[in-house]
């Protein structure tokens, strides 16, 4: 009888242990829908599709993730809680010496957000700002995923796209994935080498990635927006959330919504 009781007790302890471990593992759906996210950020889910996008990039909660140039932390607000218990999050911020007017406020916003250790786990800051400070974005060969959202045009227009992607390549483990979301220009247009519109063609981004050593694994239209003609006065920033043209044609741009975006998955062989 004693052995039976002891066995039952051990089974109960084991079951409780598994249950506790399971409860600590947050799903992407929970990270998006049940964590304390800013309401203005949640309003953009319809355009940015975070659950579907992160699943496409095969993100898991025990991974080391590099989010490149997080802006004011739209994706950081999801990734931080998701990785808190088992993973590690690297954030590549603007240089402290940056002359960009938005750099210091963006860095400050992200650092204030991630200072809340109840919601965010291990967060490490690195620097990426072309042309002078491009990596390392994480120690060589340590990252499972490198993710960049709507940033490639910024590096490409200064001629530093390949250099930035090579920094991502060095940070990733062999077999690691680079996930890219970028404003998409139709492929039948003449390419503007200055990228003044903020849009890029898929073939431009794919070439940069391949030149850095990556292999294209898959494309997705998760973040496609067929309403976006990608030919606006003021470029992509005419659309929300920027609304660069202010009241001029504001309703037109609100009706379009955020930009049409490519979603590309590359692997480090």
Image (cartoon, rainbow, N blue to C red):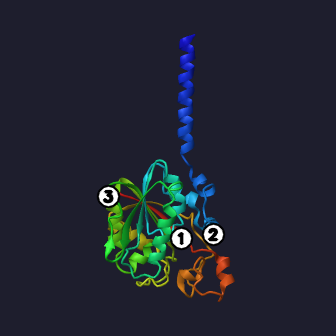
Give the answer, above or below, for where 118 lies relative to 10.
Answer: below
Q: Which residue position is annotated with label 1? A: 261
Query: How many callouts does the rendering have?
Result: 3
User: Which residue bears the numbered disc 2?
Assistant: 40
Q: Relative to residue 16, is residue 96 drawn left or right?
A: left
Q: Which mark is residue 107?
A: none
Q: Quadrant of the N terminus?
A: top right
Seen from the viewer's position, the closer of residues 91 and 203 is: 91
Decide if residue 186 is on the left or right side of residue 153: right
Residues at marks 3 and 2, CA–CA distance in whole angstroms = 34 Å
Q: Which is more foreground, mark 2 or mark 1?
A: 2
CA gap, disc 1 and disc 3: 30 Å
Q: Residue at x 36, y 67 (%)?
A: 165
Q: Nearer the viewer, mark 1 or mark 3?
A: 3
* In the image: residue 205, left or right of residue 75: left
Q: Is disc 2 surrounded by few (<14), some (14 to 19) or many (20+) residues within 10 Å? A: few
Residue 246 picture quarter: bottom right
Q: Quadrant of the C terminus?
A: bottom left
x then y, percent, for residue 177:
41, 57
Secondary structure of the residue carrying numbered label 2: helix
Q: Position of residue 267 (x, y in %)?
A: 39, 58
Q: Residue placed at 51% from the left, 59% from the top?
A: 116
**Crowd rating for badge 3 (residues with CA inside 10 Å; few <14, some 14–19, many 20+):** few
Q: Residue at x 50, y 66 (%)?
A: 112
Circles 3 and 2 in contact, beta carbons < 8 Å? no
The residue located at (56%, 22%) in the rendering is 9
**Residue 51 in sight here:** yes
- Judged from this view, the residue extending furthest toward the top is 1
The picture quadrant where one finds residue 170 is bottom left
Vertical order, 159 against 68 (above or below): below
- Residue under circle 3? 139
Q: Secondary structure at mark 3?
A: loop
């Amino acid at each position: 009888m004693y052995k039976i009781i002891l066995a039952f007790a051990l089974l109960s302890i084991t079951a409780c242990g598994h249950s506790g471990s399971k409860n600590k593992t947050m799903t992407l759906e929970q990270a998006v829908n049940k964590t304390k996210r800013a309401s203005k950020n949640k309003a953009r889910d319809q355009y940015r599709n975070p659950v579907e996008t992160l699943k496409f990039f095969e993100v898991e909660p025990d991974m080391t993730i590099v989010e490149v140039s997080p802006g004011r932390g739209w994706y950081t607000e999801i990734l931080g809680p998701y990785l808190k218990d088992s993973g590690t999050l690297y954030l590549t911020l603007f240089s402290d010496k940056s002359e960009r007017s938005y750099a210091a406020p963006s860095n400050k916003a992200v650092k204030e957000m991630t200072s809340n250790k109840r919601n965010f786990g291990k967060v490490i800051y690195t620097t990426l700002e072309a042309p002078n400070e491009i990596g390392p974005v994480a120690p060589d060969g340590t990252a499972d995923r490198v993710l960049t959202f709507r940033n490639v045009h910024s590096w490409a227009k200064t001629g530093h796209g390949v250099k930035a992607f090579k920094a991502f390549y060095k940070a990733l483990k062999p077999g690691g994935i680079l996930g890219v979301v970028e404003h998409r220009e139709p492929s039948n247009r003449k390419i503007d080498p200055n990228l003044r519109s903020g849009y890029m063609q898929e073939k431009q981004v794919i070439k940069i990635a391949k030149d850095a050593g990556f292999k294209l694994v898959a494309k997705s239209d998760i973040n496609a927006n067929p309403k976006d003609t990608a030919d606006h006065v003021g470029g992509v920033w005419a659309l929300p959330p920027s609304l660069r043209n202010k009241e001029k044609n504001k309703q037109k741009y609100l009706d379009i919504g955020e930009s049409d975006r490519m979603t590309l998955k590359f692997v480090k062989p």
